[in-house]
Each structure stands twice: as C-alpha cells, then as structure tokens.
Image (cartoon, rainbow, N blue to C red):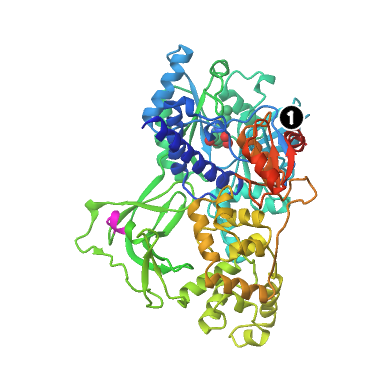
Amino acid sequence: MNREEARKKIEQLTEIINYHNKLYYTDDNPEIEDYEYDKLFRELENLEIEFPELKKDESPTNKVGGTILEKFEKFEHSIAMYSLSNVMNEEEFWDFDNRMKKELNEDNIKYTVENKFDGLALELIYEEGKLTAAGTRGDGQIGENVTNNVKMMSNVPKKIKEKNKLIIRGEALITKKDFEALNKEREELEEIPFANARNAAAGGLRQLDSSESKKRRLKFFAYQIANYRDFNLTNEYKAMEFLSDLGFTVEGVHGNIDSKKVLDIYYDIQENRSKIDYDIDGLVIKVDDVKYQEKLGFLSRAPRFAAAFKFKPEEKETILKNIEVQVGRTGALTPVAKLEPVQVGGVTVSNVTLHNPNEIKSKDIRIGDTVVVIRSGDVIPKITRVVLEKRPPDSKIFEFPNKCPVCKGDTAVTDGDVIVRCINEECPSKITKYIEYFVSKPAMNMDGIGKEWIAAFTKSGLVKTPADLYKITKEKLFEFERMGEKLAGNMLKSIEDSKNTTLKRFIYALGMRQVGETTADLLAKYFTSIENFRKADIEDLQNIEGIGEVSAKSIYDFLNSEKASKLIDDLLEAGVNPIFEKLAAEESPITGKNVVITGSIEGFTRTSAKEAAERLGASVQSSVSKNTDILIVGEKSGSKLKKAQDLGIEIILADEFIKLANK
Ligand code: IVH
C-alpha cells in the first residue's frame, strides 16, 4: 500500500471506528460483533505502525472508551483509567511475552491472569471505610457520576474495614441467570427484550432513577486498586486477595504463573466459558510484580504491562432444518434459518438470519446441512460455514422465491443486486411490520397497542397507513373480539398521547431506510422543524457530520417522493405535532445550535473541540451554510470566517468557547 492509499484507509477506518465507538459506549447499542470491531481496530493500529507520520492525535487508537452522557454530573478520575491492548491468538501472546522478557531483561516472568469481564468499567471510591463516590470510565479522564446507582448494587459493600482512601476499579455486569429473568419479565410486560447482558448493564447503570437501575440486578467484579501505592501491595495477586478480604467480589484470578500456564488456562477457560454464569470475552494477563509494572509503564491508551487475551467467538454445530422467508417493513425478503436449537454463548439459538440470497449461495447452505453457529458474547448469532463432511445425501438446495411469499406480489432486486424486495405497496406483511415500527418505543411510543392487535387491525383493513391509527374510534375497536373497555381506553389514550411528540421520534417513525435513532437525532438537531426538514436539499444533508453521501441521497429521494409527502401531510393533519426538543435550553449559548468550528483552539484537538461542543448540546457541522447558527473561531481560521461573515452568522471566539467548555 502506498502512502496515499494508507492515508485514505486510515481516514476511513477512523470514521468507521468512531461510529462504532459511539454506538457501543454512548448509545449502548452496538451493531457489530466485538471481534469484528477488534479486526478494524487492529487494521488501523497496523497501518499507523507502518506509517507513523499519518497517525493523528485524535486517532481512536489513542483514546479510551466513549464520550459521556450529559444527564449525569461529571466524575473526574484522579488517576487516569486505561484500556487494554489486545492479544488475538497464541502467536501474539508469545510476542507479548517476549516483549516483556526483553524489556525487563528477565527470562521467567510471572503473570496474574484474570477473567476479562464483558461489562462496563466502574471506579468506586471509599473514604474512611465508606463508599463515597462511583463513576463510569468515560474517556478515561472524565466519566459520569453514578454513585446512587452503584449504591443499589447488591454485592458492593457500602462499608469496609479499611479506613484509608481506596480507589477500586472493576466491571459492572449482569449474570446470565439474572439476564434471563430480566428479559422474561420484560416480555411479560410486553417490553422489547435486551439484545445482550452488556447493553442491559450499561443502560442500567446510566439511569437517572436509581430504582430503575436496581431492577437490572447489576453486580460488581473488582479487578484493580488504582492507588495501590498507598498500600503495601507488591504484586497484582496480593492486591486481589486484599480486595477479596475486604468483601469485594473477586473471581477468576490465577496468580503468580508462568507463560506456559497462562496458555493452559486460556484454552481451558475458552473451552468451558459457557459454564461461567456471566459473559467473559477473554482473559486479562498482567505482569504480576508491581515493580515491573512501573518499569514498563503506559502507552497512550493502555498499559504496556498488561493485555486482553481475547477468546475466539464460541462455535457450535447444529442442523439447519428449514429456511423461511420473512417480509420486512421495507419489503425486504429475508431468509431465516430454522435450526435444531443449540446452546451457544450462553443462549439458546433456533433462528438465525441469513440476510439475503447471496449469503445462502456464497456459503452454499442447504436444508439438512450441519452448520457452524457463533455468538461472541454479544449480539446476533451467525452461521459461519457448512460442515461439508456432514452433508447428508438428501440435502436440499433452497430455491429463493421470485414472488413475495406473503402477498404473492412481484419482487425486485435492489441495493446492488443484494436484497430482494416485495414491490407491492399493499403487501400485508409490509404494512403490518411498518405499523409495528411506527408505534414502537423509539418511534411514536404507543405502548398501549401490542403486536397481536396491530396484526388484527391490519388484517381487518382498519389500519392501512400510520395515519389510520389516528382515525380509530372506540366503536371500531369494539368490533374486535376480546376487546375490553380498559384495553380500548389504553389504546386510544396512547394514540392520543403520541400526537405530542418530538421531531426526532417523528423523523425516525417515517421509517426511512438509512435512518436509525442516531441519524434521526442528527436530522432533528440540524433542521429543528418538520417544515425545514421537508425542504432539505442534498447539500444540507451532506453537510451534517455523521451522515454520509449514500444516506443523504436516500433521505433526499424519500422526502421528494409522493409517498412521503402524503404520509407527512396525513400525519400532521391527524393532529401529530412534532416539536424540536432543545437540550437544556438555557445551559449555554451554543446549546441546541448548529455550529461550525474553524481554526485551532488552544488545549483542544479537532475531535476534542467537537466533543466539547456536543457536550454543550450543539450539533457540529463540517462546513458553513445558511443553516449554521454559530461559527466558533480559533487561530488561523480560513475561508470559513469570511463565508460566515458574509452570511451574517454569529461568531464566538476561541476564548469564550474555552470558558464554556471548561465550565
Ligand atoms: S485491568 C491498567 N482487568 O477491559 C489495566 N480490565 O478492554 C486496566 N476489563 O478497560 C484494566 N476485565 O474495563 C482489567 N480483569 C480485568 C478486566 C478488565 C474487564 C475491562 C476494563 C478495561 C477493558 C479493556
């Protein structure tokens, strides 16, 4: 790869990784599996090693974790909280071990090995034996103050016998048993179950109402004493014993072992991890001797003396009994594999999406095959391959339907020959799925209407479009069997309540293909009213940081379609009133404003200035346009200043911005 190609690739990877960081750390809603993320991260790291001059200060490889949520008070870490470098396989483990030996000039290094808990990092502070404060990791320097929620955790001691100030770190997580119970409860309440324990834990810890947090049954697993120097602790293993003696939950520690033993333990736990009652995604290897740890020191985001030795995602074989084709809200025909149920990564898997016909073809998946399923502690299970040696003679090639399996209507191949869609606007499956989406929690939030009722309403023809929901009357509802006074009342109330909604929800509820919650939020902040949004031109859309060209084009096409016009008109006419909610409106002069930052600002990198502005509730754009409210001007600002002056845009100077950001 030449320098120019590397520069482009680094830029691309940075953007992708930042996007996934936000989903994972800030939104608690990851889209990709951990090992896929690790691969991207590793690719970026390698390129930066090969082309060190291309590495930027604000590279994700220099950063720890995510940004913080505004709703919490800040929690400053007196000692920085680091992340860990990854070791992905045996070869990399030996590289790590050799590096330690070389740098310490010592042949037989002893390690302490711990479980790598797959939860959310926390710091707890004890003073005079009492738990006084607790915070999340955030960016490693500043996290969120979650003391009240941590006090609700059943296994966190509120008092300890040690009277000196103690700063403890560990991971908050939900055990598999508790997670199952929690999801069962949610299903009974007709709430959407959590995708995985980590998200439920991270979301639980970041609730403003600590009784909500308590319901998630979080547990704390301690793994480090940040101020170990204040105690007479000469090695890692002893520190763990000390914590355990004080009443903290300390699990899965193997102290004072050599590198060979580390590998034995790694393979053993990797094989048997499903028997452990919480998710772990690897082991953490730490040089045991504190003197050595200090000698080795830290890199920008991780210590040199420790590493995360990641597990391979767990794999299981099972039989693929059938393939069914479902029709989604956008008409996409999605093949779903029906499996002989199998336990993998701590859950029972019986349905796995195969995404599109190409995946079936390229993996040569046939009905009756034995397939390998993975689920890497996280999110969505996947079929990785077919075990060809076990293919039975009567295995059947799956014929992908060329008509919609629900309405028998015509289909078309879209999205670069990948996705087959039903093109019948009246397909009952499309309508039902769209109405389900429209009433769902992140959209119009009509929690009084369950899925089975939506199916009944669309089947009977009572509801064909979202606007029809607003025409439902009590009399109409009573035409359905099993409808009671209370149920009907709840439904009508939640329909009525949904009329007062936010612009973000409304935009999301329109169901545009490229627009999830994050993008809907960006659009709402940028346009601030439905009228503005409807008039969006393509440059406006492309100007929004976080929205790429493809999304911009697809949003633009949607807005200019007859279908969208009618949908929006009908909803507004039905009385839906989307309002742009300004974030903490009075908080700062840039809150709720579209800002552009130009020139360099002392003490900030480009990224950290952007993040600071976002923390203050601003939406940051990359270039000045008529929609820009404020230009923040640093040193050596260029053409943007002139353009802003021409457009009469308000200017804020760097000094004032620094004051706002440091408030
Ligand atoms: S030690 C200076 N030990 O993994 C060393 N971290 O991917 C700092 N984690 O940020 C971390 N289990 O949140 C350590 N036994 C363990 C851990 C652990 C989970 C988390 C931790 C860290 C992240 C890095």
Q: Which residue is mark 1?
A: 161
Q: Nearer the viewer, residue 50 or 83?
A: 50
Residue 629 seen from this side = yes
Toward the left, the furthest residue is: 393
Residue drawn 58% across and 49% down? 543
Quadrant (top left, top right, bottom left, bottom right) of the C terminus? top right
Q: Nearer the viewer, residue 408 or 656?
A: 656
In the rendered view, does 268 fall on the left or right side of 447?
left
In the rendered view, does 634 fall on the left or right side of 563?
right
In the rendered view, does 417 fall on the left or right side of 633?
left
Question: On the rendering, which quadrant does ligand 1 occupy?
Answer: top right
Tell me where the magenta segment starts and ends, as one range.
Answer: 360-365
Residue 627 is one of the magenta-drawn residues: no
Image quadrant where residue 249 sits:
top right
Quadrant (top left, top right, bottom left, bottom right) of the N terminus? top left
Residue 97 pos. (x, y %): 43, 22
Residue 612 pos. (x, y %): 68, 39
In the rendered view, does 460 fall on the left or right side of 421?
right
Residue 249 seen from this side = no
Picture layout, residue 68 above or below residue 372:
above
Residue 563 pos. (x, y %): 53, 72
Residue drawn 42% across and 14% down? 107
Tell me the SS state at disc 1: loop
Residue 650 pos. (x, y %): 74, 45
Picture layout, residue 442 above or below residue 313:
below
The amino acid type, in three-letter code, at marker 1 is Lys
